[in-house]
Amino acid sequence: MTEPKAPKIEFPCDYVIKVIGHAAPDFTEFVVEVVEQHAPGLSEADISVTDSSKGRFSSVQLKIVATGEDQLKALFEELKASGRVHMVL
């Protein structure tokens, strides 16, 4: 029996990522700066921020134009390597 393959993503496409980390005054700005390096052209409408109920964590959701798997991999790795990001979904 063969494993089902993950659906292939057609690039370029709109792609939503969610970045979760410790809430800090500059967390959103930090995330946007990193994402802009890999996917320039974000607008305010593409970004939404939600704080956890106790205010300890912040979740930044961004809609980018994904150009390929290499771009997404590099973006995820840079965010995770920062030490400020708990999770990238």
Image (cartoon, rainbow, N blue to C red):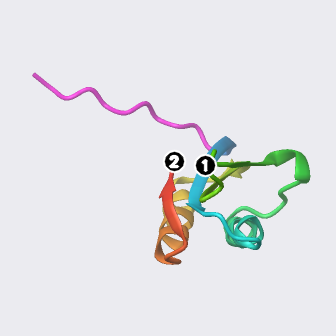
Which of the two labelled residues, at mark 1 and mark 2, occupies the earlier sequence position? Answer: 1
Q: Is residue 34 left or right of residue 88?
A: right
The residues bearing labels 1 and 2 have C-alpha atoms spaced at a distance of: 5 Å
The disc label shown at residue 70, or none: none
Q: Amino acid at mark 2?
A: Leu
Task: Identify the image quadrant of the N terminus.
Answer: top left
Q: Amino acid at mark 1?
A: Lys
Question: Residue 36 falls in which quadrant of the image?
Answer: bottom right
Question: Residue 20 falls in which quadrant of the image?
Answer: bottom right
Q: Is residue 25 visible?
A: yes
The residue to which callout 2 is attached is: 89
| Residue found at the very far left of the displayed protein | 1
The residue depicted at 53 percent of the width and 77 percent of the height is: 82
The residue to which callout 1 is attached is: 18
User: Percent position (x, y) of residue 41?
Assistant: 84, 60
**Main secondary structure along the magenta-highlighted residues:** loop
Decide: few, some or many residues near mark 1? Use Cα within 10 Å; few <14, some 14-19, many ≥20.
some
Q: Is residue 79 left or right of residue 16?
A: left
User: Percent position (x, y) of residue 68?
Assistant: 57, 53
Name the element at disc 2. Answer: loop
Residue range in magenta is 1-11
User: Percent position (x, y) of residue 45?
Assistant: 88, 45
Whether residues under marks 1 and 2 lie with C-beta atoms below 8 angstroms apart, the answer is yes
Q: Is residue 58 magenta?
A: no
User: Percent position (x, y) of residue 67?
Assistant: 64, 53
